[in-house]
């Protein structure tokens, strides 16, 4: 059973997710509608999200990011070590 299944339905902090996985992969096709677009609306969406996260980190507050789901994938890093990535 993988880590995602073990934690199903439980809130996790971003730090916890980073502690569990060696890397997080977000394929281009799965990114938010604002990703990669250069319009004013999309730029403001990205800026707002990043500012919200930055302010929370600066002030030591938490931020709820709805939900994140994905699958675990094994990969071999540059040192030849087998690692686990969260693939969203």
Image (tube, rainbow, N blue to C red):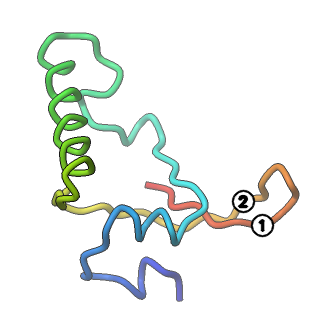
Left-right relation of 86 to 52: right
Question: Which mark, residue 82?
Answer: 1
Q: Are marks 2 and 1 in contact (CB under 8 Å)?
A: yes
- Which residue: 20% across, 56% down? 65
Query: From the image, which quarter does the C terminus lie in?
Result: bottom left
Left-right relation of 64 to 77: left
Task: Specify few, some or many for label 1: CA neighbours under 10 Å numbering under 14, 14-19, or 20 or more.
Answer: few
Mark positioned earlier in the residue sequence (2 or 1) = 2
Locate residue 45: give its quadrant.
top left
Figure check: 40 above or below 15: above
The residue under label 2 is: 75
Closest to the observer, 26 or 15: 15
Figure check: 28 above or below 86: above
Give percent across and percent down for residue 1: 53, 89
Q: Secondary structure at mark 1?
A: strand
Locate residue 73: give its quadrant.
bottom right
Left-right relation of 58 to 76: left
Residue furthest top in the image: 39
Closest to the observer, 14 or 74: 14
- Which residue: 15% across, 11% down? 40
């Amino acid at each position: 059973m993988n880590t995602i299944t073990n934690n199903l339905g439980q809130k996790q902090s971003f730090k916890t997710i980073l502690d569990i996985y060696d890397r997080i992969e977000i394929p281009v096709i799965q990114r938010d509608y604002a990703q990669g677009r250069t319009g004013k609306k999309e730029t403001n969406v990205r800026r707002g999200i990043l500012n919200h996260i930055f302010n929370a980190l600066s002030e030591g507050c938490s931020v709820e990011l709805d939900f994140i789901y994905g699958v675990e994938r094994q990969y071999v890093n540059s040192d030849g070590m087998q690692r686990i990535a969260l693939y969203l």
